[in-house]
Amino acid sequence: MDRVEALTDRIFLIHRGRRVLYGGLDEIKESHGEHIVRLCFVGDGTELLSLDGVEDVRIDGDRASLILPRSVSPDDFVRSIPHSLTLREITVVRPPLHDIFVRTVAGGDDEAA
């Protein structure tokens, strides 16, 4: 799926003979995925575990990966990061097409219905 994302801007995916994803790559990611925020920081990362509006937090040493629901904008999230953390890197991305496809065919998204 990574190659598909790199080579195309329009997607038509079929699962068991049914269309499950169709449209522009950006459009699909916008409508099916939340934001993933990746941080590299200095400080006590456990403070990230108590932030409001975060679906999932994974911390590994000085790095964290957080999943924001659609209702939380990355801008609002960044403003809520504790001041006691010093950010070294921050990246905001949408979930990869593979994850969206798997969630859709597993019944976790309305598109496959």
Image (tube, helix red, strand yellow):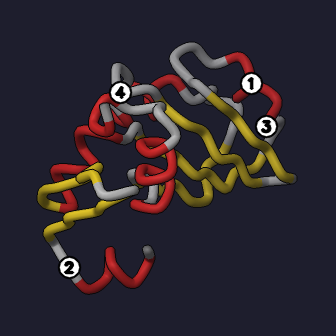
- Frontmost of labels 1 and 4 is 4
Q: Identify whether 36 is placed above or below 51.
A: below
Residue 11 in which image quadrant: bottom left
Lower position in the chain sequence, tag 4 or tag 2: 2
Q: Where is residue 14 in the image (x, y as percent from the top left)?
A: 30, 61
Residue, disc 4:
70
Pointer 3 with pointer 4, Cβ within 8 A = no
- Of residues 56 and 97, the one nearer the viewer is 97
User: Which numbered dot is residue 8?
Assistant: 2
In percent of the image, x 21 and y 61: which residue is there?
25
Q: In this view, does 59 lie to the left or right of 52?
A: right
Outermost residue, front side: 17
Residue, disc 1:
49
In percent of the image, x 57 and y 13: which residue is there?
52
- Of residues 2 and 68, the one nearer the viewer is 2
Q: Position of residue 46 (x, y in %)?
A: 82, 30
Residue type of the residue flagged with mark 2: Thr
Q: Quadrant of the N terminus?
A: bottom left
- Of residues 99 and 38, the one nearer the viewer is 99
Q: Is residue 29 left or right of residue 11?
A: right
Q: Position of residue 68 (x, y in %)?
A: 48, 31
Residue, disc 3:
45
Residue type of the residue flagged with mark 3: Gly
User: What SS does tag 1 mark?
Assistant: helix
